[in-house]
Image (cartoon, grey):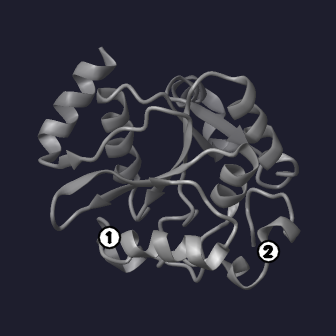
């Protein structure tokens, strides 16, 4: 039923999806994140292509009547006020659990900001899984799964590869789009705090 609903939703959207869906566990970077529609498009495409998505969301989303829906779509609640240990928790899920694509929106908000959050980078490195660059290029009505690669630990070089994609596509609300850049590009991420919100 999920696949049928997803196909119908994507047909209505008039988006063309391209790229090979990931066959192994990965961190799925989702960008540009300028609208809540981004998530629905990516979730629908994952359902159509049988990618077992999990995603991180603020704890408040899981309270009340929406909680069961959030969990049913793969949501994992995160207490943003006490995020310590999240990177290692996610790494353990990758090591011990079934195949999954962990969706992370490094922009962290639908509004423009100066930097991406580095949680996606830390989790992928700790879990030793590749990242897959997921995207929606709204003016061209295309989206899907872009390049897949293992992060090297050379933060600047890795981010250059990421910028090669995201700096050349446009989100649903371009005014809210943030170019991929980490505060940590001038130092080792291994020295950073183990947090979800890398402010």
Q: Nearer the viewer, residue 18 or 14?
A: 18
Quadrant of the image containing the C terminus? bottom right
Which is more N-terminal, label 1 or label 2? 1
Left or right of 19 in this view: 57: right
Query: What residue would you read off at disc 2?
Result: 188
Provide the secondary structure element on which disc 2 rests.
loop
Q: Total number of numbered labels? A: 2
Disc 2 to disc 1: CB gap under 8 Å: no
> Which residue does the image show at 39% across and 70% down from the upper left?
166
Q: Is residue 94 above or below residue 85?
A: above
> Which residue does the image show at 73% across and 31% down from the upper left?
95
Provide the secondary structure element on which disc 1 rests.
loop
> Which residue does the image show at 26% across and 29% down from the upper left?
6
Q: Is residue 196 above or below residue 11?
A: below
The picture places residue 11, in percent across and down from the top left corner, at 13, 37
> Which residue does the image show at 39% across and 75% down from the upper left?
164
Q: Nearer the viewer, residue 89 or 128?
A: 128
Quote the CA–CA distance across marks 2 and 1: 32 Å
Q: Nearer the viewer, residue 59 or 102?
A: 102
The picture places residue 169, in percent across and down from the top left corner, at 29, 71
Q: Is residue 48 above or below residue 151?
A: above
Left or right of 28 in this view: 139: left
Q: Residues within 10 Å of mark 2 (few under 14, many from 20)?
A: few
Q: Nearer the viewer, residue 80 or 166?
A: 166
The picture places residue 188, in percent across and down from the top left corner, at 79, 74
Query: What residue would you read off at disc 1?
Result: 173
């Amino acid at each position: 039923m999920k696949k049928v609903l997803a196909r119908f939703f994507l047909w209505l959207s008039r988006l063309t999806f391209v790229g090979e869906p990931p066959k192994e566990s990965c961190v799925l970077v989702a960008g540009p994140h300028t609208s809540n529609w981004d998530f629905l498009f990516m979730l629908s495409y994952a359902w159509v292509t049988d990618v077992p998505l999990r995603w991180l969301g603020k704890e408040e989303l899981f309270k009340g009547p929406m909680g069961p829906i959030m969990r049913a779509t793969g949501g994992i609640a995160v207490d943003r006020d006490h995020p310590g240990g999240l990177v290692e928790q996610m790494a353990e899920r990758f090591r011990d659990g079934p195949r999954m694509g962990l969706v992370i929106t490094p922009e962290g908000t639908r509004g423009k900001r100066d930097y991406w959050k580095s949680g996606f980078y830390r989790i992928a490195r700790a879990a030793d899984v590749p990242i897959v660059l997921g995207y929606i290029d709204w003016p061209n009505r295309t989206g899907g799964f872009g390049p897949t690669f293992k992060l090297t630990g050379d933060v600047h070089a890795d981010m250059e590869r990421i910028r090669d994609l995201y700096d050349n596509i446009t989100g649903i609300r371009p005014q809210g789009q943030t170019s991929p850049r980490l505060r940590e590009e001038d130092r080792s991420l291994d020295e950073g705090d183990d947090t979800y919100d890398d402010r």
